[in-house]
Amino acid sequence: MSQVEARLHELGIELPPVVAPVAAYIPAIVAGSLVYTAGQLPMVAGALPATGKVGDGHGLVPAADAKEYARQCALNGLAAIKGAIGSLDRITQIVKVTGFVASDPAFTGQPGVVNGASEVLAEIFGERGQHARSAVGVAVLPLDAPVEIEFIVAFA
């Protein structure tokens, strides 16, 4: 068992299968010593756990739920990265995370939502999981997903 797989096991995390693309792209691509992922939706077993805008109020996805979905996006991204480079032990640094949150116009808590991805990466990789980040509110995401995460990762 690899170091990262052992850490995942210790945390009770099982990586999902690589999510099939929903359009004309590939889940992750290697360029030199970097892996770039496509935007990862919070798919679980081929379906979104929720759809719609994030915010406070009736009919909106609560920020706490969206944070969990951002975590799922990160795990989906790690699965895509593993598919591209073979082993997560090869990751030397999570370089950049970009999080997109489908936001109700009054919602300004995008950083807290994207913390779902950032926190799980830090739990898994420690210092190698610390990264630069953007958390952006958007009007709508593919398939009406509440959150989407993409990565740039360095590997050896």
Image (spheres, helix red, strand yellow):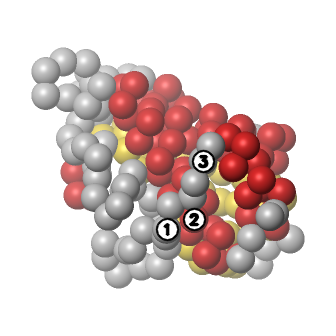
Q: Callout 2, which amino acid?
A: Ala
Q: Which residue is mark 2?
A: 79
Residue 37, given in percent of the width and then of the height, sits at: 55, 66
Query: What residue is drawn where x is 39% and y is 74%?
Result: 20
Q: What is the distance, in whole Å, between disc 1 and disc 3 at their CAs?
A: 13 Å
Say if 91 sits above or below 146 in the image: below
Between 133 and 58, the one lying in front of the other is 58
Q: Is residue 83 left or right of residue 105?
A: right
Name the residue carrying label 3. Answer: 13
Residue labelled with disc 1: 17
Q: Position of residue 25 (x, y in %)?
A: 42, 79
Residue 139 appears in the picture as rendered: no
Q: What is the three-letter code of the residue carrying label 3?
A: Ile
Q: CA distance from mark 2 to mark 1?
A: 6 Å
Between disc 3 and disc 2, the foreground one is 3
Residue 65 lies, in percent from the top left, at: 36, 31
Q: Residue at x 36, y 56 (%)?
A: 43
Quadrant of the snapshot with the N terminus: bottom right
From this viewpoint, which residue is outermost toward the top?
A: 57
